[in-house]
Image: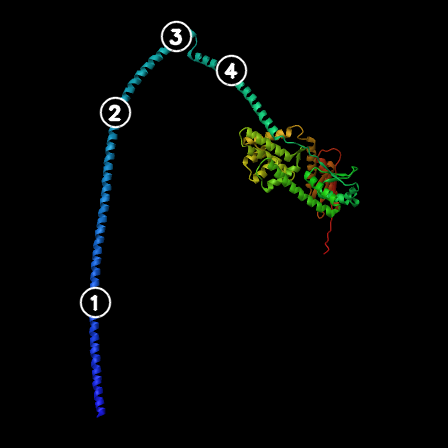
Amino acid sequence: MNVGIIIIVGVISAFLAAFIVFITYRSRLGSMKNYKFDMLESARKEGETLRKELVLEGKDEAIRIKQKSEDEYNEKLKEVRNSERELQKRESNLDRKVESIDQRYDSLQKYDQDLKKKEQEVNKREEEIESLIDQQQSKLEKIAGLSRDEAKQTLKDSLYEKARVEAQVKVKDIKESAVLNANKEAKKIIIEAIQRSAADHTSESTVAVVALPNDQMKGRVIGREGRNIRHFEALTGIELIVDDTPEAVVLSGFDPVRREIARIALEKLIQDGRIHPARIEEMIEKASKEVEESIIQAAEEATMELALPPFNAEMMHHIGSLKYRTSYGQNILKHSIEVGWLSGLMAAELGMDGQMAKRAGFLHDLGKAIDRNVEGTHALIGGEIARRNKENKIVVNAIESHHEEVPMDNPISALVQAADSISGSRRGARGQTLENYIHRMEKLEEISNGFKGVNKTYAIQAGREVRVIVEETQIDDAASDLLAEDIANKIQAELTYPGQIKVTVLREHRSIGFAK
């Protein structure tokens, strides 16, 4: 019974639970339907609102577009009306101008008619005057006994002769006055330039004297069997004269650079005391470097003296080399400085470019730094060096034309030529004998160097001997004898010289080993 009650109670509970679930589900289903309906209604209302807003915006945009179009139309209409008014104004002006032109045309026609009438009257008067003139001429011809053409020619000849005489007198006076004034002015400018430059001059020599501490040093200079002196002369190309002069030896050679190197090297050897072939080579190398430094220093001092801007390395080397070059006994570097001053001062007096003239005068003998080693005249060689180093074309022309080898194309070139003549022709500036001697020395070396296998050539003993050093691999002993004869024959055929010239060919084979 209890079980039955329990079962009944369970069934009733289950039925109640199912009923409650059913009621709950039905309630929820109704709520969901209501939510869906509300959502649809809300969406419909929002869509309607959005549609209305879009319609309003479209109407506003249409109104704006319409307003903009009307504004543009009004603006264009205004421009068209302004254009019409401008065209009407121009048309009115054109009408007035046409009317004015018509009036002027009528006036011109009337004026032309008046001119034609006056021209007819003038022509009539001219005919009357010509008739009167012909009558007068006929009467004059009868009175003078000359025709019209004859009288005209007589008058013309008389006037021509009178004018010619007067012109000759006037031209003569002008020429005399011009020459007198030109000479005075030229002399004044040149004298002032010379006085302001006032360059000193010292004649160069072809020998240098080196003092010795004692006479015993002469033997060490000569060396055993003369090997030191021979080696020294072979390396420098300078003759070393050891004679009875007390405590002194003489260096003789026409090349001033080689002579200076030899002098410095010999003084260093004497001061050092160790004199042998290896030491001689070392001292000559040091002396060569010192001379090279002195060349650059001389160039710097010269440019500073003339207040010129510095040149490049190649130009400075060539300029400094002029310190050891002479022409007719005149030092070329000093001569160049003097010509630079003279050219600059004369140019300044004449109102020209003084700095340009000074530069051109200073560089005019630049080619003499290398003319012994390059074919051509020193003027053309110097011009080529200047052109290669981008000097002004006025400077280049002044260098090339100062001996009239090329035409002068500017006034500064003429000033440089005049300054060169002034510097070279003043008293004591040059000596012809020394220059001839140097040219002969150069020619001797040039002839010998022209033979195949010759390494170096030195003219020594004032040109009485030529020492030729040959390549021992190209010239053997037998060929050395023939070479000496060939050189002597060519010298005899091409040169004129006093006495005789000795040709010595030196062929040396040297073997060197090193102990390590």
Q: Nearer the viewer, mark 3 or mark 4?
A: 4
Residue 487 lies in quadrant? top right
Q: Position of residue 286 (x, y in %)?
A: 69, 45
Q: Which mark is residue 139?
A: 3
- Which secondary structure lies at badge 3? helix
**Quadrant of the image containing the C terminus:** bottom right
483 displayed left or right of 64: right
The numbered dot on residue 40 is 1
Residue under pointer 4: 165
Could you tell which of marks 1 and 4 lies nearer the N-terminus? 1
Instruction: Name above or below for residue 38 compared with residue 406.
Output: below
- Can you name the residue that lies furthest to the top here? 143
- Foreground disc of the pair 1, 3: 1
- Estimate the spatial distance between the alpha carbons at disc 1 and disc 3, rounded to whole Å: 142 Å
The residue indicated by pointer 2 is 106
Q: Nearer the viewer, residue 128 or 501?
A: 501
Query: Do callouts 2 and 3 mark residues in contact (Cβ within 8 Å)?
Result: no
Q: Name the side, left or right, on which 21 lies relative to 225.
A: left
Image coordinates for residue 83, horizontal then vertical, percent: 24, 39
Which quadrant: the N terminus?
Answer: bottom left
Q: Residue at x 23, y 33 (%)?
A: 92
Q: CA distance from mark 3 to mark 4?
A: 34 Å
Could you tell which of marks 2 and 3 lies nearer the N-terminus? 2
Position in image of residue 66 (x %, y %) = 21, 50
Q: Is residue 33 above or below residue 486?
A: below
Using the rendered view, name the quadrant where residue 272 is placed: top right
Sequence-first tag of 1 and 3? 1
